[in-house]
Image (cartoon, rainbow, N blue to C red):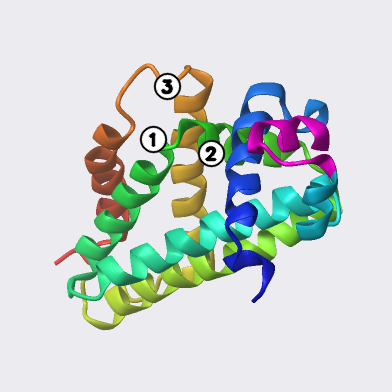
Amino acid sequence: MDNKSKPKYKLILDAAVEVIAENGYHHSQVSKIAKKAGVADGTIYLYFKNKEDILISLFQEKMGQFVGKIEHELKDIHQADQKLYKLIEMHFRQLSEDPNLAIVTQLELRQSNKRLRLKINEVLKGYLTLMDQILKGGMEDGTFQDQLNVKLVRQVIFGTLDEVVTNWVMKEQRYNLIDQAKEVHYLIYNGLRKHD
């Protein structure tokens, strides 16, 4: 049985999200995470090498679940523009339903060192690949312009979603993030769609 399937692993990650959101990554001692999880400090080291490992594992776990959810939802959608809308809506929903996770992903991960950021970029690959598939599918079926630079467009889409969520976090989540999905989709889709 690997660590990821053990109940304390998930407990520690959930506690870490809360502690890091509340105190910031640099002020979140392993002992605070252990206390929040209701485990002994030493127990954390049975699952994770250090605090950095907790942050990466947390991101891997949450991002992996998220990509799996999106893939599942997109299976029954055939139009590229609808797939794009679903991805935007789910991106916003995932983070609006877990405000602590939003604080960690939008603010705390940005302050980490270069080595950590490279590992996080590695985790993001699955999500970015999903975007590429939607874009390529839309180019093939004539929904989107067929001369798109997929890598550039993907950066624009991800950057837009990321900035909208960051703004929501910075404004202390005072409005409904999911309500932004239609307008964001409208702007992106109209930039991508094939004009007759």
| In the image, residue 145 above or below residue 43 | below
Q: Amino acid at mark 2?
A: Leu
Of residues 101 and 157, which is closer to you in this image?
101
Tell me the quadrant of the picture where the C terminus can be found.
Answer: bottom left
Of residues 66 and 41, which is closer to you in this image?
41
Cβ–Cβ below 8 Å for labels 3 and 1? yes
- Label 1 sits on a secondary structure element that is helix
- Label 3 sits on a secondary structure element that is loop
Question: What residue do we see at 72% from left, 31% from top?
Answer: 35
Q: Which residue is mark 2?
A: 101
Q: Which residue is mark 1?
A: 96
Q: Quadrant of residue 73?
A: bottom left
Question: What residue do we see at 66% from left, 30% from top?
Answer: 19
Query: Is residue 135 in view from this perspective?
Result: yes
Which residues make up the magenta segment? 29-41
Predominant SS of the magenta segment: helix
Residue 151 left/right relative to 183: right
Name the spot of residue 20 as percent of width and height, x first: 68, 32
Which of marks 1 and 3 precedes in the sequence?
1
Name the spot of residue 74 as percent of width and height, x first: 27, 69
Question: What residue do we see at 61% from left, 63% from top?
Answer: 6
Q: Amino acid at mark 1?
A: Ser
Q: Which residue is mark 3?
A: 173
Q: Is residue 97 magenta?
A: no
Question: What residue do we see at 50% from left, 26% from top?
Answer: 169
Closer to the observer: label 2 or label 3?
2
Q: Quadrant of residue 32?
A: top right
